Amino acid sequence: MPGHPLDYASINQAARTLLAAGFSVIPTGANKRPALPSWKPYQDRLMTEDEVNRHFATVDRLAAIGGRVSGNLECLDFDDPSIYAPFLDLLTKRDPSLAASLVKRKTPSGGFHLISDNLNSGLFSTGGHGWQ
């Protein structure tokens, strides 16, 4: 389909690659909503090969599920790009090593993601940083 960021075969292969690396993934539509009746089972387990074949045959995108199922993956999603730089500046001042360890990505919609797979990163908690 014209205008797709990736073709269906590429999405399927990306899902397989992420699953092989230990990340739980689900198919999503262009609207970012899960393309499954329920994605709850994949919060606790990875998809089987048969499920990947079924669910990633004709989808627009995929999403990784955070938490324990994906090796403690954490992701902060900044839909408003004007918030991203000030947040990253503050984080860098408070914890330069944490800020440097994060994967930083621009999203297709113009926002940003900060991604960590470190359970003790403190990205979503005070993590001993004493943030208020």
Image (spheres, helix red, strand yellow):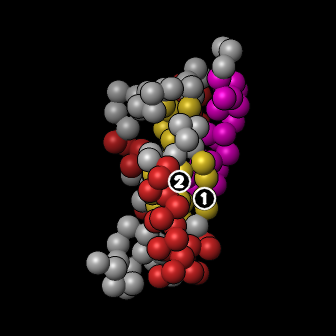
Quadrant in the rendering for residue 56: top right
Q: Quadrant of the C terminus?
A: bottom left
Q: Residue at x 66, y 19 (%)?
A: 3
Majority SS type along the magenta span: helix
Point out the residue furthest to the top here: 1
Does label 2 or label 1 sit earlier along the sequence? 1
Residue ID for mark 2: 113
In what element is the residue under mark 1?
Answer: strand
Q: Is residue 45 visible?
A: no
Question: Magenta span has 8?
Answer: yes
Indicate whether 108 appears above or below 104. above
Residue type, numbered disc 1:
Lys
Image height check: is 46 above or below 85? Answer: above
Which corner quadrant of the image does residue 17 belong to? top right
Q: Position of residue 98 (x, y in %)?
A: 54, 76
Where residue 124 appears, as percent x and y from the top left, is: 38, 67
* Quadrant occupied by the N terminus: top right
**Secondary structure under the numbered disc 2 in the rendered image:** strand
The magenta stretch is 4-24
